[in-house]
Image (cartoon, rainbow, N blue to C red):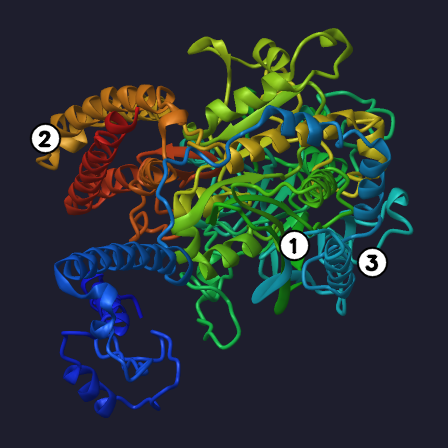
Amino acid sequence: MPMNGKTLYQQNFRLILLYFPTHLSCSCFTECQQKGKYIAGKQVSRWEADTDNVDIEYKNLDTQSIASVPFFSGRKGCLLKILFLLVFLSAGMILGYMIRRNIHETLIKQEPTVEHQGIKQTYNDLLRQKIQADLNDTANYKDHLNEMSRQVMLSGIGTTNKFIEYLIQFWSSFPLDSVKMKQYSVLLSYRNYTSKSSSISVLSTMPNTSVVFQAHYNHDNMSGIHPDYIPFNAYSPSGFVRSKLIYANYGCKKDFSRLKKLNVTVKKNVVLVKYGKIHPANKVLHAQNEGAAGVILYPDPADYANGQSIVYPKTWWLPGWAVPLSHVRYNLVGDPQTPGYPAINGAPHTLSENANYPKIPVQPIGYDDARYLMSQLGGQTAPADWNGCLNVSYKTGPGFSDDSLQLELDVNNVIERRNISNVIAVIDGKFEKDKFVIIGAHTDSWTKGGVDHATGYSVIWELARGFSALVRDGWRPRRTIMLALWDASKYGHIGSFEWVQEYEKMLGRGAVAYINLDSVIRGNYSFHAEANPLLYSIIKNSTQKVPCTDPDYYDKSVYDMWLERFMDPGKPSQPKINPLNGDSDHTPFEYYLGVPSVSPMYTFNSKIYPHLPTYPAFSTLEDDKEYVETFLDKDTKLEQTVTKIVADMVLLLADSAVLPFDVQNYAQVFDRGKKFLRENEAVISSANVDINVLYSKIDIFIEAAKAFAFNVTSINLDSLKESDLYLINDKLLELPRIFINYQGIPGYPQYRHLLLAPHAENLWDDQIFPGIAVTIDQCQTNKDCDPLRHQIALLIVSVHQAIEIIQDEIFIRNS
């Protein structure tokens, strides 16, 4: 027990009395001996005694008094006594001081000395060089590509589940802090393998009913394939339709409007629609809304073969027998039966799952079969801009030119509840363990998936190995790194959405950014990226550090090539970065939680092929290892390049002391938003809303964001403490969350971002100010403008709150 100075002084004085009892009363010591609990004559320590009542036993050294000694008698003796008393008193005080200091230094736990400590860890370019030197093993990438594209990996199937178990076992040998499987019970769609196959047929009714044509799903090139591969459109219901056929171009809303102007009846007929331009699900939804009885999807050679006759296997262009697969869900809320919550064990499932996917049958075909159907089609000549390269006359229908011919569509699919499995590997952060940088790719595929899924898997595998090697050498990231492999991505990013919903609270507080690795080698023309504006700077920064592998750019960076081949028309000094599309695993992070996301890739020349939605063999049997190695990335140099770019992005996000978010890039988003508002000012004015209030708030925010960005880049890290850094990064993390409305966009609860969301008519496109866009239509069609006023109010408030955040004086105090 600690003792104060007075107590120590009293004890020291008593010790003095032990040796100088003469002329002093000792009654108090006698009384203390009687009250004490210790045995007389026993030596005790101060720890065994009461604090202020220390029992001290002393002995009569002799029956003779000191006073009787002649040396201490008389005046001289008195002076000597006083002198000795003063000497012993001084010695006691010195002894007491030494005891007290010793107690504080050795017996009492000292408070640590508070000293200024600078930033403990930040981005180190030497570390970047070290990991990038470890990402050049061509054999590794080839092994990953071979392993992943060896077989069809449908979600919820035994083959896929065994592969995931193998992966977990392998990754568990790395020095990762955790490797876990997360399972969810979700509703998936399959071909009915136990019953008759789906078919598209043309029947002749004269003289007797007979089949004169049937779509080909067993071409010679398909022999020996995995039995799981039978072309279908996931989430199409089963159904049988015998009706007339019409042609509706790409199936956009404006295409159906044009058919109306041409007096072509869609209702109760089957619609033939080209893949491309908009998401397949939106094509089917538009047809369903027009009353169609079914939909047939095909890839036109104008888009998927560039109108050429030389195709795969001699070139990368799609052959006529190839059939692209796709899902046709238009409301991507994760598991169809657990909207708004994760499909964990024990959670009840709703019964209204078909509200998320079509009610009419849908089936894909190759363009060789589409050529026959179009050649028989009657009706009007199609508009000139609807023509493709089938080398026949494009007609609108309805029906065939020969009235004795009829179309028969028979779809036989099943919808079943299956377990899907995500894999989550974790490297714990050293100083900000509760902040997460997440990198994800998907494991499932409906074909062998050379590009989609194997290229993304190869990159994340090498990232896991590379960062594990750094951990083994003693490094640990400032923030936690998560490596995720998603299941059921092909069904509308179900695996990632369920995981995000399960860990929504944790991710909402701590997710720094998400990097999506989906089909990262779609071409070999140039690097390309889709991203949240906050991450533009780190993409440019990282691509400037990685050398380009193209022989024409041997002495330049990836950034230099990117800038030259995809220059931003609005900012010629910078490369073009596109908005994120709405059907990949970044969607729940970006649009549901507000976590800034980025999707890096190599791609083809979209300026030459504007209607090609992605690489020609996407989601077909031709997308295999040979396709990648022959036409896209022969020596895996592009995969290595993407891996190095992503590795540096991860280091920037995980290790930088101040989060590398570029807030002033929000100006580009708000410039688009103001243009959209001006185009719709008449409707907004009719709702009795003063839109100038929002314009004013936006202008203030843009100016504040510029000052905010300057303050962030001007921070002197040498004078910054970790506690200050925490507050700064907290503001940067909070900013993108400000624009999340937890009620969701009206009619689309899975999209909660007030600034950007997937377009209601095309999941591949984005919509600026989506809540306002949806309610403008309501205000015009239903004359109900209250929802519009509400959405404008939400945006005004969010912009106001964002201004408050970025004008916080913390940057001024610590810069």
Residue 8 is at least partly visible in this image = no
Judging depth in this view, the residue of 521 and 105 nearest the camera is: 105
Q: Quadrant of residue 310?
A: top right
Residue 152 is at least partly visible in this image = yes
Image check: 686 left or right of 658?
left
Q: Quadrant of residue 321?
A: top right
Residue 207 is situated, as x and y percent measured from the top left of the image, at 76, 54
* Image mark for residue 549: none
Pointers 1 and 3 in contact (C-beta within 8 Å): no
Label 2, residues with CA under 10 Å away: few <14, some 14-19, many ≥20: few
Residue visible at 34% across and 26% down in the picture: 666
**Figure check: 239 above or below 761:** below
Which residue lies under the disc numbered 3? 227
Image check: 685 left or right of 775?
left
Instruction: Check disc 2 and give the amino acid type.
Output: Asp
Q: Quadrant of residue 627?
A: top right
Q: CA distance from mark 2 to mark 3?
A: 61 Å
Residue 371 is situated, as x and y percent measured from the top left of the image, at 72, 34
Pointers 1 and 2 in contact (C-beta within 8 Å): no
Decide which of tag 2 and tag 3 comes sooner along the chain: 3
Which residue lies under the disc numbered 1? 409
